Amino acid sequence: MSKDFDGWNSVKQKVNGFNNKYIKSGEIWICNLGINVGYEIDGKGSRYFRPVLVLSGFGKEGGIVFPMTTVSKSNKFLFEISENNFINLTQIRFMDSKRFSRIIGKVDFRTIQLIKKQFLKII
C-alpha cells in the first residue's frame, strides 16, 4: 500500500505553526499523528488524525501517548480502555503538544495505573 508522505508533509508544516496546548495524564485527544513508516500506526483522513491516550503529560511541551484503535486483535499488546476502544502498547511515543487538536475524553487514575502495569509486562 502506498502512503501519501507528501500530503502529510504539507499538513505537518501547518501543524508546526499551531499553538501549544496544556497536556495532562489520562486525557484522550484527537491528534495529527501523520503518516509513518512500516508498522508504525498512522493517522487517518485528510488531516491524519487519530485519538491518543496521554500516559504522561508534560504541560505545554507535549506528552507520552498511546495511539488508539477500534480494531480488536486478541493479543497482549492491546489494552481495552472502553468498549471497542483499545490502546496499542507497542506504539508508545512522545508527541509535541502542537499535534494535539481537541480533548475527546478522559480515563481515571486507576486505569492509567493498570495500563502502566500492563506496559511494564511487555518491556
Image: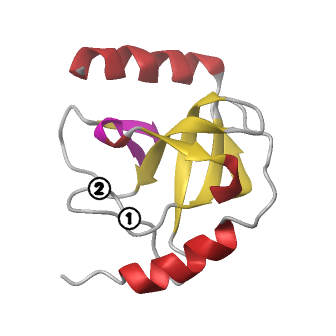
Tag 2: amino acid? Glu
Reply above or below: 69 against 116. Answer: below
Q: Which residue is mark 1?
A: 42
Residue 8, image x, y percentages = 47, 77
Q: Which mark is residue 40?
A: 2
Question: What count of labels does the image hold?
Answer: 2
In the foreground, 102 or 99:
99
Q: CA distance from mark 2 to mark 1?
A: 6 Å
Reply above or below: 36 against 72. Answer: below
Taking the spot 70% from the left edge, 55% from the top edge, the residue there is 98
Taking the spot 76% from the left edge, 64% from the top edge, the residue there is 18
Q: Is residue 98 visible?
A: yes
Residue 60, image x, y percentages = 77, 39
Left or right, 114 with respect to 76, comes to: right
User: Disc 2, disc 1: CB below 8 Å?
Assistant: yes
Left or right, 107 with respect to 86, comes to: right
In the image, residue 81 lies in the stretch drawn in magenta: yes
Locate the N terminus by quadrant: bottom left
State the SS at label 2. loop
Q: Is residue 84 visible?
A: no
Residue 94, image x, y percentages = 51, 39
Reply above or below: 96 against 113. Answer: below
Where does the magenta region start and end? 79-90
Residue 19 lies in quadrant: bottom right
In the foreground, 11 or 80:
11
In the image, residue 41 lies in the stretch drawn in magenta: no
Taking the spot 72% from the left edge, 32% from the top edge, the residue there is 24
Locate the C terminus by quadrant: top left
